Image (cartoon, rainbow, N blue to C red):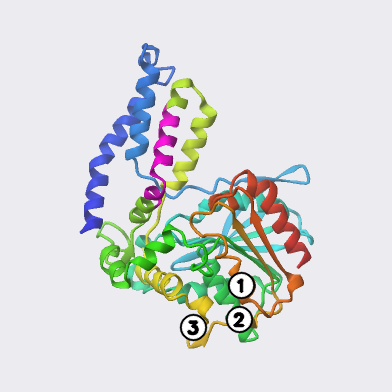
Amino acid sequence: MLYQLHEMQRAFLRPLAEFTDAGAQWFSNPASPLSYMPISRQMAAGLELVHRIGKDYHKPAWGIDQVEIDGKPVAVRQASVVTRPFCNLVHFERDLPTRRARDPRVLLVAPMSGHHATLLRDTVRALLPGHDVYVTDWIDARMVPLACGAFHLDDYVRYVQEFIRHLGTDVNVISVCQPTVPVLAAISLMASAGDVQPRSMVMMGGPIDPRQSPTQVNNLATTKSYSWFENQVIHVVPPNYVGAGRSVYPGFLQHAGFMAMNPDRHLKSHYEFYLDLLRGDDGDAEAHRRFYDEYNAVLDMPAEFYLDTIRIVFQEFRLPNGTWEVDGQLVRPADIRKTALMAIEGELDDISGVGQTRAAIGLCRGIPAARKQYFLAPGAGHYGIFSGRRWRETICPKIAEFIRKS
């Protein structure tokens, strides 16, 4: 019922969003007489703010059409090289005569945690000049037909294994936030079975052991029962979507949770956006638009995957406890010996606390100490470890150096 009410609200707000969008143009476009009224700037700013609060946010485009390599612009295009019901493996093909030998192949595993993979746009853009980049582009569960079946956390592990096999032994796996857990499981199982092994794995801000420095996210998972999540946050996709009838954890609920964690920060950001419009500060206003176009675009997660994550990762801590089995095989990170490991955390991360990702260093006892590395990014929050200035200037160069030495 909640999903249906949400759809009714969207239908109710859609005409208002369209009207305020048109109104903002009337009061700001130089071709409109209304733009020369004394209060035109205030009217345009107010109308655009209302429009952005009420509009629908769809999956943004990657917007990476070229990258500079060796001082020259190089065209980039995206191609899906592996297509599965819940994920496409996307290759960012650089228009180079041949794949440069010094450019390592990277599998960037994006989180399935409410946002689209395009949230890692800055991550991809910074890696592209020196790496051959592939990204897991997860599909909104409401757009996956019910006939495609369920998708569990174990299926995520299998997808990662398939992508690693497709890319071969010279691939370097980078996982951001949530996928650090299934990625470590996938590589552990492959090591135990003598399967293909990646050259290196980089774990960034993920809940390998959520018992370390627990955050609001961790506390919610441990103070509510599994049945509470099952009964309160799982809903059925309504008939107007391809995935009608599928049980999901809706993206709009995840978005509400994101906003509730820092409501004052978001209110301040919107107020400052309004002031930027009044002042004519187009640069800061556009930065606000870009951020919230991405932040407000959310996807639904399969109910099975979400509930598995709650139980296996955040309530029973099966990975650090050594009790997680996939297809009857125990996940043993200590079996990994050929793959180098780097763990990265943000000093101010309020999603995955300090120590949660570093736990991978201790679990992977079979990797020689010389091939394990840990970096705590000073002053970086959760998003700062994979986007923004700290990512581009400090963290990405460290990853590039680590990969090349692996």
Stretch of the chain drawn in magenta: 258-274
Q: In this view of the protein, which residue sits in the foreground, 335 or 187?
A: 335
Asked if the residues shown at circle 1 and circle 2 are in contact, with their CB atoms under 8 angstroms apart, the answer is: yes
Question: 18 left or right of 197?
Answer: left
Labels 1 and 2: the sequence-earlier one: 1
Q: Secondary structure at mark 3?
A: loop
- Viewer-side label of 1, 3: 3
Asked if the residues shown at circle 1 and circle 3 are in contact, with their CB atoms under 8 angstroms apart, the answer is: no
| Residue type (three-letter) at the residue carrying disc 3 | Thr
Q: Which residue is mark 1?
A: 164
The picture places residue 346, in percent across and down from the top left corner, at 59, 54
Q: Write the residue at 64% across / 47% down.
A: 390
Labels 1 and 3: the sequence-earlier one: 1
Distance between the Cα atoms at labels 1 and 3?
24 Å
Q: Write the residue at 41% across / 72% down.
A: 315
The quadrant of the picture occupied by the C terminus is: bottom right
Q: In this view of the protein, which residue sits in the foreground, 319 or 173?
A: 319
- In terms of secondary structure, what is the magenta stretch mainly? helix
The picture places residue 132, in percent across and down from the top left corner, at 68, 59
Q: Which mark is residue 323?
A: 3
The picture places residue 73, in percent across and down from the top left corner, at 71, 43
